Amino acid sequence: MPIKKRGTGLTAVADAWQLADIDVSASYPIRPYTAVMAELAKRIANGTMKCEMVHGEGEHAQFSIAHGASMAGARATTGTSGVGVTYAFETYSPIAGSRCPIQALIGDRTLDPPGDFGSEHTDCLTLRDNGWIYGWAQDAQEALDNSLMYFRIGEDPEIMLPQIVAMDGYFVTHIAQDYEMPDQEQVDKFLPKFNPKFRLDVNNPVIMGPQIEPEMGPPLEWDRHVVMNKVKGKIVEVTEEFGKIFGRKYAPFVEEYMTEDADMVYVLQGAHAVTCRSAIKYLREAGYKIGMCRIRWFRPFPDEALAQILPKFKVAGVVDTGTSYGAPCGGGVLSTEVKAAMSEVPGKPIIQSFTSGLGGETITHEEFFAMAEMMKQTLAAGKIIQSGTWVNFNDYHEGASQINAAKTEAAPSK
Amino acid sequence: MAVAELIKSIAQTTDLVDTYVPGHRTCAGCGPALGYRLVAKAAGKNTIFVGPTGCMYVANTSYACGPWAVPWTHAQITNGGAVASGIAEAFRMMIAKGKIKDEFPNIIVMAGDGGCSDIGLQAMSAMFYRGHKVLCVMYDNESYANTGIQVSPSTPYGATTMFTPAGPAIPEAKKHHLKDPMPIFCAGGHPYLKYGATASIGYPIDLMNKVRKALAQDGPAFIHLHVPCPKGWSFPADQTIEIAKLAVETGMWNLYEVENGDWANKKFQALPKKLKPVDEYLQTQKRFSHLQPEHVATIQEFVNARAQKLGMEVPLPPAK
């Protein structure tokens, strides 16, 4: 029987890893992800979980240890946050390129400087071009569920790619929530044992990661490209099967909230969706026809799903919780991606970039209200009035009065 | 510690199986290739090699034409120690859980001097510290040879490389004496490292037995293997073994082993009756051909000091 539990996103993923019977996990401390490893260590010490925990001397080693373990045929996990994500950078492409389906938990954290424990998606977004499957969980339950789904998809013999279970630091990693821990039988039914076609086996020797001639490289890169696109089909299949076995239904790619009759939508990913939903309730009362589209997968990017969904609206405000200095249209990575995905879609909405929630700041109702007001003005004008808005910082630039006016205008409806 | 079955003569090695086989494209007279072959032969078939980036990766792993009859995997030049740690613990845990029926394999990292004592030092030190059952063989050809002979911490003082050419402003070429990984790893700072040795392809039986002793340990082991490089050092390809031996005879290379971290009581092998002057060795290689007498004297002083520091009781040539 599934158990009702109260815990954080990190304990939820530890539950998933225990149920998945992982063999090796590689640790190195950095906040806010650390507690998942502390949780594993406790379970291993108590004897409730049988897993070799290797304490790496840094994130570069953590990912390398998991890589080695995976090549040997083990189900291996690791994880990190912030500058730890970037310190390990050399290892991402080799892990994906040698098709080792290790799983990493990334609890988002702002990159340095300055030292800031707060969440931003920038750390995890920096590795978007390395062939890892990933997306953001909005809460502990989804973190657990994503972990199981990611194993299943990443270890599929047709896929064999590493995955990142990403979650906002603090909001998901540290806030205790109620969630349901599935039972072992359900998981065994859903997730087959990891049984790679090739591993380091002295009875069947293989060479892994050979040096090749330049002309042999592009076909291997093409393989990675093709397989990443194949992941989309698996996501649909696996999400549906997950729902049948565990009783929790997820939209495969994009979760829509109050989108019927909406002419404006927030487009975002991760934990701020929780605040966004409640802000929408107030905005609806105040007469704003607004909804939300929450992106569940960042790689592969759900462009087909967005192409089907977004033309229903007139304005889409993409909320970036990360930075990409000098990016087009003053936006961040997510808005750039959404714009690219929509570039050739007929009837696409006006896509507006907002940056908010940096440094682990909550995106408040007032900020969502302000974004709604700006989208409304865009809708009225039929064009973007200000390209790339840093919602919290408009006090310091020319859009200040506009945002402040919007905040006060929308606020009374609360 | 299990007792290793030691080899007594070259004749006995003909019965052993080669697992480093034709299919590579190393240079004629390649010291590292011979070293690889001897290590692989001593280890046998139940072996997995981890090859951090280095010349033995670049020259050996032409796609679909690799020279190994045992599993081999690439690691980045930075992370041979970490990848090997993961492999070792995966086998341990999968065997313990009954997920596989394999016998625990010999896991050998064949790291170059860069991949072990320079950019790869941190991962290797961490692997030794954590006590994984892995052998690291640092095959030392005294340069970054995979990229065309650039300076490494193993490059001796006075050697030319592409990054340390000799010129009027820097007549001695490389200005620094070499970094020695043996005291770093084996002098007691890594408590689980029970066996450390230096070896040379000029002394193949000694090398193979050191590999076997290393693999018989319950934890990590380290072998620092001297492998002359005809291309990098500029000497004729048929001189590799002679130069390897001359290195030992002149004290440019010392053969010894350290058991149970007992650095004070290292055992020396092939100890010459007296050391020949280093000049005899330097003159065999074009990488030293620019050296002036004062530079040679600097090298002689370094070699003499090292011999004394190690406790080699052998008459030393005068440092002029």
Image: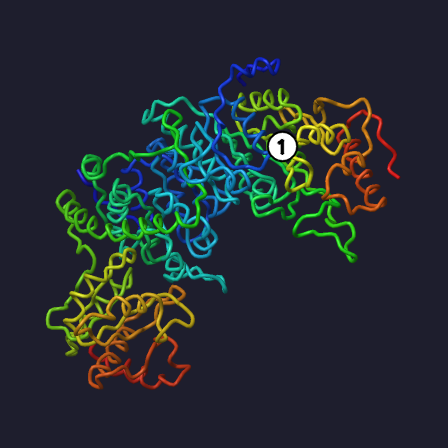
Give the image location of residue A27, x and y in percent.
44, 43
Q: Is residue A237 left or right of residue A27?
A: left
Quadrant of image for the C terminus of chain B:
top right
Could you tell me how many numbered marks the image carries?
A: 1
Looking at this rendering, what residue extends furthest in the left direction? A261
Q: Is residue A412 left or right of residue A40?
A: left
Most foreground residue, A81 or B283: B283
Please state the chain letter of the residue tagged with numbered disc 1 in the rendered image. Answer: B
Q: Dot 1, how many residues are within 10 Å of its Cα: few (below 14), some (14-19), or many (20+)?
A: many
Q: Is residue B48 left or right of residue A187?
A: right
Tell me the element at label 1. Answer: strand
Quadrant position of residue B136? top right
Q: Residue at x 56, y 21 (%)?
A: B212
**Quarter of the view holding residue B100:** top left
Look at the picture and state if A329 lies above or below A40. Answer: below
Residue at 77% in and 38% down: B282
What's under tag 1, amino acid-wise?
His
Picture coordinates of residue A101 (x, y %)? Answer: 33, 43
* Picture residue at 36% right of the left edge, 69% below the top: A332
- Quadrant occupied by the N terminus of chain B: top right
| Camera-side residue of A127 and A180 | A127
What is the x, y in percent for residue A61?
48, 44
Q: Position of residue B245 (x, y in %)?
A: 71, 27
Q: Which residue is mark 1?
A: B224
Scheme by which the image is coloured: rainbow
